[in-house]
Amino acid sequence: IPVLTVLCTIVLTACTSTPTSSNTLIVPNTDNSYLMPKGMWKDPDTGLIWDRCNAGQTWNGTTCVGTAIKVERSDIRDYVRDFTRTGGHKDWRIPFIGELASLRLCTAGWAKEAKEISELTAQGRVTQEVNTIKTTYIPEDRIYKNYKGVRDSNGQIYIPRRCADGSSKPTLNTNIFPNTPTEGYYFSFPGDSTFSSTKWNLNLDNGDIGFRNTDFGVPTKGYVRAVRDSE
């Protein structure tokens, strides 16, 4: 066989080789197998991407190191804008209270309350006491955009108010959010003087959310966990 023929055969074989199966193993940068080792987590229910560490902590490739700091409420928006760079991103923001509430993990379930329910039956009106999940109203502009929760007849949104007694502290999944403080408040957007001293907060101790006034015992400093919108 002429040498030229052999060389051409080798070249053609190389040029027509098929891609290796390794090409199918590329992980998209919105998948948690990619995000979590970089200090981020994507909530499959909301599509939001969360910083696994609190303000003041850094991700070392395995866990959150350092001490979570409490930031003045009036500074939280600027703090996240200027200092949160997890994953090399600059589009981190302060979460709304409905977004923070979606992170809660209540190991003992939701807190319940006794309510009297009255209904008309064939035997007349019957009133009975039932245990129902304690809920709180959340304004439409304080919930994540694809929320499909409970709405009343007026279209107002209600979500569970807090975790039941006996739930583990903090009321978050610490496998996703390691070294989270066990007590204190997470602050939510807005973080300035828009609503004077009355703000929405999430209590890490019991998962309670509410519209609280800083004049009545709610601290002016709180923890911050940043969030990004999905890619």
Image (tube, grey):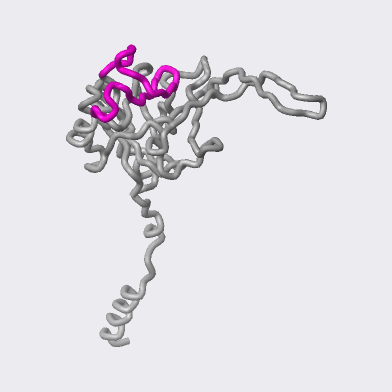
The stretch of residues the image draws in magenta is 191-220
Provide residue 161's location: percent of width, then percent of height. Answer: 48, 24
* Nearest the eye: 187 or 105: 187
Residue 187 in the magenta stretch? The answer is no
Q: Is residue 83 left or right of residue 227?
A: left
Query: Which quadrant holds residue 134?
Result: top right
Residue 203 seen from this side: yes
Q: Is residue 218 left or right of residue 168?
A: left
Q: Quadrant of the N terminus?
A: bottom left
Query: Can you say whether 185 is above or below 11 in the image?
Result: above
Query: Which quadrant holds residue 26?
Result: bottom left
Residue 215 in the magenta stretch? The answer is yes
Query: Can you say whether 95 is above or below 219 in the image?
Result: below
At horizontal 20% and vertical 36% (from top left) the residue drawn is 81
At horizontal 32% and vertical 29% (from top left) the residue drawn is 188
Query: Which quadrant holds residue 197?
Result: top left
Q: Residue furthest front?
A: 124
Provide residue 72's location: percent of width, then percent of height. Answer: 22, 22
